Every structure is written in C-alpha cells, then in structure tokens.
Amino acid sequence: MLRSELLRIRTSRATAAIAAVVFAEAVVGGLVVSFLPGILKALIRLNDVIPNATQADRMSPETIDALRLGHENVQATVADPAGGFGLGFSAAVIGAVVLGAFYVTNGYRHGSIALNALVQPSRIRLLGVKAAALTITVLAACLPLVIVRAGILAFAAAAQDVGGTLGMADLAGIWLRGAGSLVLFGLIGLGVGFAVRSPVASLTMIFTVLLIESSLRPIAALIAGGVTPANYLPFGLSADAVRGPGLFSGMSFDSSVGTLAAGIVLAAWTGALLFLGARRFVRDDIPVSTSG
C-alpha cells in the first residue's frame, strides 16, 4: 500500500507544479541572497539616473556590509533548503504544507480515500501509511534542494572570492534541520487535509493563516520589539528552527526565538494539527467523494 501511495503523490499534477515553484524559488532566492550587497548597490546607483526609483539608498553602508556572503549567517541562509530570502516565509515551506493538504483532500475529492479504507480498515494505520508516504516524498525532494543550495553557495563564494565560514558539520546540521522542518510542515498540511477534507477550503485556510501571520509579525515587532507571541506562529518558525536568526543576525529587528525552541514549537504545531486531523478521520464517516 505504501508503494501505491508513493506513486499517487509522484504522479500528481499538484506535486509537479509545487516542485517547479519550489526549485525556481530555491535558485532565485539563493542567488539573490548570495549577491544581495551588489544588487543593493546597483539599486542605489539607479537612483542617480532615476531619482527616487528605489529606497535602497536609505540603507546604511554598515547594513549592506552585514549582508555580504562572507558572514556566517548569510552563508547559512543560502545553504538552507527550507529557506527563501531569509524572511521565514518560503516557497518550500508553503509548498510542503500545500502538498500535504492536497495529497489528502484529492483522495476525498476523487473517492480514493474510501477505497483505501476498504483495503486497510484501520484508520490509524491508513493515516500512518499516508504520513510515511508524504515523509518519504518530502525527504526525496530535499536532496536536490540541498544540492541546488550547496551549488549556489559554492558558485557565489568562488565568484566573490569568499572563503567558507561554515564547516561541513555546520552545513550538514542546516541541511538535516531544513529537511526535518519541511517534513513537519508537510505533516501539518496532512493534518489540515484530514481535518478539512476539501481542497479549496484547505488552501483557503492555509493562505489565510499565512496572511494573518505575515501581518501580525511586523506589527508585534513594531509595537513590542524583540520576541513576541507572534514569533511562535507556525510559518515563520522554519528559519529559526533551521538556522536561527539567519540573514538578519545581529540587526536591530532580529527577533529569533532560537533553534531549539523553534524546533520544539514547530513539532508541537505539527502534533496538534495531526491530532485534529486524525480525530476527525477516525470518528467521522468517509464520503465517497467531495465536490471540493
């Protein structure tokens, strides 16, 4: 049954679309972070040609210098397979959640979940098989993501004649934590899918939470400063769980909760949503299909 579930995920059009977006963001995001000081300086020079074309000239030379690839936190951001531009929200994180949700809700939509339940009457075992299939898929996708990020880091370091400040042990830790983070987000999506059952409702819920969190975080930082309860909301925990402060380490608006704390809270979010999804899956009847 596990093989059939792996085949179901691999051949899904949603999986292909999500993978394309994630890998495109990995390349673009990695290159932008790697060459960010040069990009900012080019934008500042653009203001000499077109007045007030950008706001880059408001950044101090010290801030731009802190974003050079030679700094350990910048290299960690480039190497992070779960990261985007270092802001916490990335295509990889969102893609893992959406993949987990769509994997389950498409089963409800097409009625295959009912056939699965006939083959495996134990709902908990069936949920475990689907969780295992999703975990294997996410981990398999992480390998090329790691290769892409590592390649960009090596290329950018050579192009800028920058030595590596991260050792292999540090890089391996970032890669492993990044893979683990994406697995947890995938399982969050799985829990949402089992709890909601509708693809449209699941997608709406995911992006509503993302929108609310992206608004609450800067507002809370502006009002209270430092670490606030908004820092413990799920989507933004990825950067902290994998690399700590990352790109903005040492800056005035750095509000990292720390790698260990972020990992524990992210695991707690995953457990809570999996519990809610499993509770409904075990207790409620399985419809033959849903309209979405």
Image (cartoon, rainbow, N blue to C red):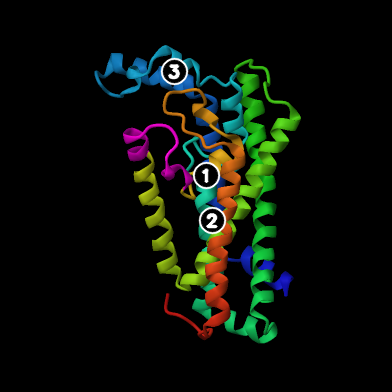
> Which span is picked out in magenta?
218-232
**Mark 1 is on which residue type?**
Leu
- Relative to 176, 31 lies left or right: left
**Is residue 218 something one can see in this rendering?**
yes
Q: How many tags in the picture?
A: 3
Magenta stretch, overall SS: helix
The residue located at (35%, 39%) in the rendering is 220
* Residue holding disc 2: 269
The residue type indicated by label 3 comes to Thr
Would you place residue 34 above or below residue 100 in this image? above
Q: CA distance from mark 2 to mark 3?
A: 34 Å
Of residues 79 and 173, the one drawn nearer to the viewer in this rendering: 173
Secondary structure category for the residue under label 2: helix
**Secondary element type, mark 3:** helix
Q: CA distance from mark 2 to mark 1?
A: 10 Å
Residue 237 on the magenta segment: no
Residue type for callout 2: Trp
Determine which of the numbered discs, if any, sits on residue 237 in the image. 1
Instruction: Give the residue pinned by disc 3.
Output: 63
